Image (cartoon, rainbow, N blue to C red):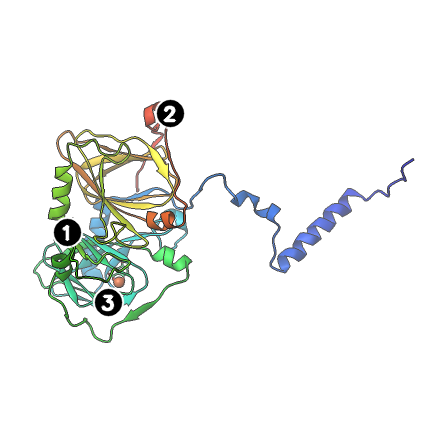
Amino acid sequence: MAKPQKEVPMASVEQMRAAFHERMHANHMYGLWELASQMTPHPQPKMIPYMWPWSKLKSIVDESGSAVPVGEERRALQLFNPGLDGRWATTNNLIAAVQVLLPGEVARAHRHSPTAIRFIIEGSGAYTAVDGERVYMEPGDLILTPSWAWHDHGNETKERVVWIDGLDIPLIQSLEAMFFQFYSAQQVPATRPANASKRLHGHAHLSPTWVKEKPQSSPLLLYSWDRTWEALSALREHEGSAFDGIALEYRHPQTGGPVMPTMACWVQMLRPGEGTKAHRHTGSAVYHVVQGEGATIIDGRRFVWSKGDIIALPPWALHEHANTSGKEDAVLFSIQDTPVIQALGLYYEESLSENGGHQKVTSNFSSD
Ligand code: GTQ
Ligand code: FE2
């Protein structure tokens, strides 16, 4: 016969447990059983899909010129994702900003560990000087500022210049690898001819054999719009990607890899009436509408876009794009954090099989 067990009253078991948890927390410990909900079956990003329409950006851009000077810092409007609680972040890893430089202005020389790209929206003939080389801007150009490269911006023209900045600041912050310095003078003296990197490295399939140095970031600092458009046009009869249309990645001319270790840049053309199928993948992106009109459906929400709009795409969000114009090509430029995801073996991708590969639209985005 079993020994009669001494009964422990339920209430005291609960009390003992509560006291245990309290003691554990007071000593900076948590039980795995309290955290299990964070081991999600798939990514559940805090950032939300969001769009900054150009109409809104433009009115702030217009006002910014007279409202704030170019002081120590640049006149760059940083796009904060509403899902990220005031963090300096457009996506979990990337920041996008719109920067304005008025005629005669100079933005003071500095360098930082975050990597930057510029995509020019408006204005011709202003420059970014990168490590002593002036890189001159035309609309549609992509200009790189590798990690830790000195840079200043100058506008000696008679018109305002506006561009998009893309940086990996949120990633660098979470890695706690932020370094920043101002240069001792307003500008870094020019030590190389203007657009030198394009003259040396900007010849598509032909590389200078005597250049032995292979930097992690692309040594080509200027990807001119005329070349970009030439490539898109030459490929327009191809089927392209089912998910992205005629999507091209800007490449490091020596390695063939992404332009920067932490950021990839893409340009994609959607032909009149073209619509892509939906897929999702790890890695986040920020899109900028270079030209045309269309819509992107992200997790069932339709974002109707036109020239100048900026859209944030969360990791693992279903997305598909469409050019809704019957006549004009649509072109999207984007920055993506996929090189980081790829390097760590964390790239996952899935296409939507139901409903012919298209999402059901359940809402329409509005920024009001
Ligand atoms: O123009 O160098 O949007 O350093 C954020 C940080 C732009 C710049 C930004 C920067 C810059
Ligand atoms: Fe900078």
Against 304, residue 310 (above or below) is: below
Mark 2 C-beta to ligand 1 under 8 Å: no
Three-letter residue code for mark 1: Leu
Q: Position of residue 294 (x, y in %)?
A: 22, 35
Question: Is 361 situated left or right of 290 in this image?
Answer: right
Q: Which residue is mark 3?
A: 150
Earlier in the chain: of badge 3 and badge 1, it is: 3
Spatial separation of the CA atoms under disc 1 and disc 2: 44 Å
Q: Position of residue 241 (x, y in %)?
A: 25, 34
Residue at 41% in and 51% down: 85
Q: Position of residue 251 (x, y in %)?
A: 23, 49
Three-letter residue code for mark 3: Trp
Against 82, residue 99 (above or below) is: below
Q: Quadrant of the N terminus?
A: top right
Q: Which residue is mark 1?
A: 206
Spatial separation of the CA atoms under disc 2 and disc 3: 50 Å
Which residue occupies the foreground of this view, 198 or 35? 198
